[in-house]
Image (tube, rainbow, N blue to C red):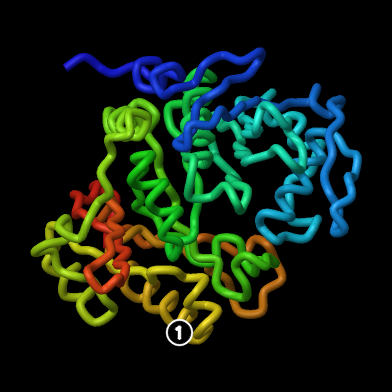
Amino acid sequence: MAAIQSSDVLDLARFGFQPRGDGWARVDDQGESVAFASLGWPHAQMPTFDRDERGEAVATDALNFIVRLQGQTWGMPPEEVVPANILAVLRDGGGSVLVAYRPEIGFNADGWLGFAIALGGRNGVLVSHMLGVREDARGAGGVGWSLKALQGCLAAEAGHHAAVWTFDPMRGANARLNVEKLGATISDLTLDKYGVLRSSLYGDVPSDRFTAQWDLRSPRTLDRLAAVADDRLPRAGAELLADIPQATSATAPALAAKRAPAVWYRIPADIDTLMDADPAAAIAWRGEMRATLGHFLTVARAERHAETTDPIDIAARVTHGAYVITRFVSSVDAAGERTNGYLLEHRPLRPQEDT
């Protein structure tokens, strides 16, 4: 079989994007036209507006508007967001700053739909840093998927062969987008990737993160993106987990020791609802996740000498795992109870790896 070229895999027209000026347009899942643009330093010259707490228009420019949107979407303080002077140069290094908006309204407080920020990598891997979707546009219209598909296509055009990004393992909507709709796989879990996050979205919890690995030249990527574009991607249901053992902190050691061909791990139906109703239970579940998935995935954690203040005494310790997450299941039973879970499949270890 001939090797698949990135241009064959990630074709904008194949996924419903049509040229619109220097950007693109795509009809969303609701039949509405969405405009997309790639921003760079010239957009610091583009006037737009945000709205303050009273709903009054506040003049700004396109890049500083994205700075404001980061804080609004993720609940982060100003010092935690990507500043305008960095947004201005990301495109120059093979990264991207992409925005989605209603073309009849414009890219402003009233018309914006989403944004995606990524850094170019000299090793050919795009590092996607942040994806944000307007709250009332989430779950319908496929704005998040469209931004990621566009990001992948432009990354391939810029010479990248892969993309990576992190996400919270407890968030089912993110998992379905990343694993099912985009076809990314996961083999790495990093404990406290970002230290203590000052974000109203996450609250005071460990910042444990999966790393999504997206092969931009893989047939898997083409198949998933094409299936979504053609509206023929079925939702992975509970039948996918039939006869596959469930991994818990109690069963994980034995399952990993016998190298079960596949296992699945359950996450909350809605981590935010659980956090509001029972914060202790939500935090305990995150601890249980560490104890369970640590037997299967490659886990990175910070290692330091006690009480050190010297940077050379801090290092990352990595324990290699033998499994990769390939699917995400989200199904609702007859009683209305939702089951969210990851499917992990065993893969042979490379010679230099150990468990």
Side (left or right) of 211 relative to 248: right
Q: Secondary structure at mark 1?
A: helix
Q: How many marks?
A: 1
In the picture of the structure, the residue carrying the numbered disc 1 is 281
- Where is residue 108, by image quadrant? top right
Q: Which residue is located at x 58 percent, y 20 percent? A: 24
Q: Answer whether residue 48 is visible to the viewer in this image.
A: yes
State left or right for residue 119 relative to residue 41: left
**Residue drawn 63% across the image and 19% down it:** 23
* Residue 125 seen in this snapshot: no
Disc 1 residue type (three-letter): Ala
Q: Is residue 285 above or below residue 23?
A: below
Above or below: residue 120 compared with residue 71: above
Task: Provide residue 41's location: percent of width, then percent of height.
Answer: 79, 25
Query: Quick one: 151 or 58, which is closer to the camera?
Result: 58
Nearer-the-camera pick, 165 or 327: 327
Residue displayed at 52% across by 71% down? 272
Report whether 312 appears left or right of 57. Answer: left
